[in-house]
Amino acid sequence: MTVKPQRKPFIETAHGAAVLGDALDALATLPESSVDLIMTSPPFGLVRKKEYGNVDADRYIEWFRPFAARFHAVLKNSGSLVIDIGGAWNQGRPTRHLYHFKLLIALCEEFNFHLAQDFYWWNPSKLPTPAEWVTVRRIRVKDAINTIWWLGKTPWPKASNRRVLQPYSPSMKDLLTNGYRAKKRPSGHDISDKFAVNNGAAIPPNLIAVPNTESNSHYIRYCQEHGLPVHPARYPADLPEYFIRMLTERGDLVIDPFAGSCMTGEIAERLHRRWLCVELREDYLKGALGRFKGREGSKAKHDPSKKEDTNFYRIPRPGSLWSADEGEPLREDGGKKRADRKEAGKSGKNLKNQNQSKGFSAVAIAARGTAT
Ligand SMILES: C[S@@+](CC[C@H](N)C(=O)[O-])C[C@H]1O[C@@H](n2cnc3c(N)ncnc32)[C@H](O)[C@@H]1O
């Protein structure tokens, strides 16, 4: 059975449809307890607005309330709500806004959702912003994480981690080959010899490492050829695919109420889930057509070989460059007053010299630790 939205769809495919309009209107047409998964990335709460009209972080919960109520109503008891949401910096201050945590608390405490698990999407390609705090005053680090709140309508949304297994890390492979001596860990956990059983693949952690670097996809070329804007806040295909695989079966209904370029729809179509996407802006949906046009019946399948080199991101352990010399002195004012550029430059050079004299190179550092 295909999805039959009440209004004429802007895009219609074998398994789903995208409609132009407000998500609340579209959700009102869906029967209660009919949806298996709401997979979405809403407009983030920002202090400085983006192209597609973000929501004021201070008024975010107020804005989200009517959506939360309808999401709860349309989900089945076995259904899930998965929200990808980035944080925000307070204006003019090197501090973080709390809006995405407040959203999570409101969803659980006001709307009776249950936090099944919090996920963290690490985007290794994120730029070091805001420049003032990260690259100029050097008083904060790169913000490279989006939170992903996975919520259930009940404490028992249907799910299986067997659907999203990943290859063993090099250290686990080594352990499986060379054996493991069962013992108690310093944390007190008793690691039995069952730990060293080769199950073929590893249970993934709640940290998802995916760069957001798509630059030459069919979708982008389609937008460019048709003079349409490429959506500025797309999530990578791996994100919706992960949750659609883990939380739904073929034929289940997946909806994305803030669809943007319909990435969710494209993946749901490929995985034979019924789907409904809703987007306010017509130019984004015109671009989204490129995800489906000319691809009817396409057998485009997941090709793991293409992802081989991105299976594991190596991140150096924090201590790779630590030494007895702790580097530039900390400023008592926390960086409130901008440091003199020459002075800041000097301490930066000293650190560089120290590291070079220790024989560290980026390659050596990268080879030291893994993210797994
Ligand atoms: C963060 S973007 C989603 C991007 C999408 N995940 C992708 O990969 O292309 C959020 C989208 O929600 C849309 N939007 C905002 N309010 C909406 C509403 N009330 N109903 C439908 N769409 C809305 C915005 O126009 C924007 O395109």
Image (cartoon, rainbow, N blue to C red):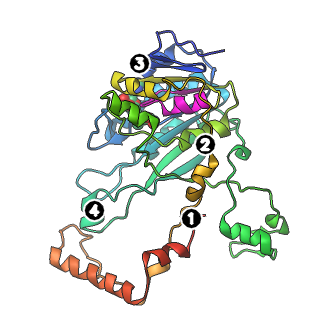
Q: Is residue 174 left or right of residue 286?
A: right
Per the image, the residue denoted by label 1 is 371
Q: CA distance from mark 2 to mark 4?
A: 33 Å
Q: Is residue 246 left or right of residue 8?
A: right
Q: Amino acid at mark 4?
A: Trp
Q: Residues within 10 Å of mark 2 (few under 14, many from 20)?
A: some
Specify which label sits upstream in the sequence, 2 or 3.
3
Give the labeled residue for mark 3: 20
Residue 182 highlighted magenta (yes or no): no
Find residue 193 and report its horizontal and vertical position in percent. 84, 69
Quadrant of ligand 1: it is: top left
Toward the viewer: 102 or 328? 328
How far separated are the C-alphas under marks 2 and 1?
19 Å
Mark 2 sits on what residue?
242
What amino acid is found at the position of numbered circle 1 in the picture? Ala
Q: Is residue 269 magenta?
A: yes
219 or 26, which is in the foreground?
A: 219
Expressed as whole percent of the image width and height from the top left, the position of residue 61 reads 40, 35
Residue plotted at (51% across, 36% down)? 107
4 or 1: mark nearer the eye: 1
Evaluate if marks 4 and 3 touch, with contact meaning CB atoms under 8 Å apart.
no
Going from N to C along the chain, the mark reached first, 2 or 1, is 2
Q: Which mark is residue 133?
A: 4
Query: Can residue 227 be seen in this snapshot?
Result: yes
- Position in image of residue 209 (x %, y %): 53, 54
Q: CA distance from mark 4 to mark 1?
A: 26 Å
Q: CA distance from mark 4 to mark 3?
A: 39 Å
The C terminus lies in which quarter of the figure? bottom right
The image quarter containing residue 95 is bottom left
| Part of the protein shown in magenta | 254-270
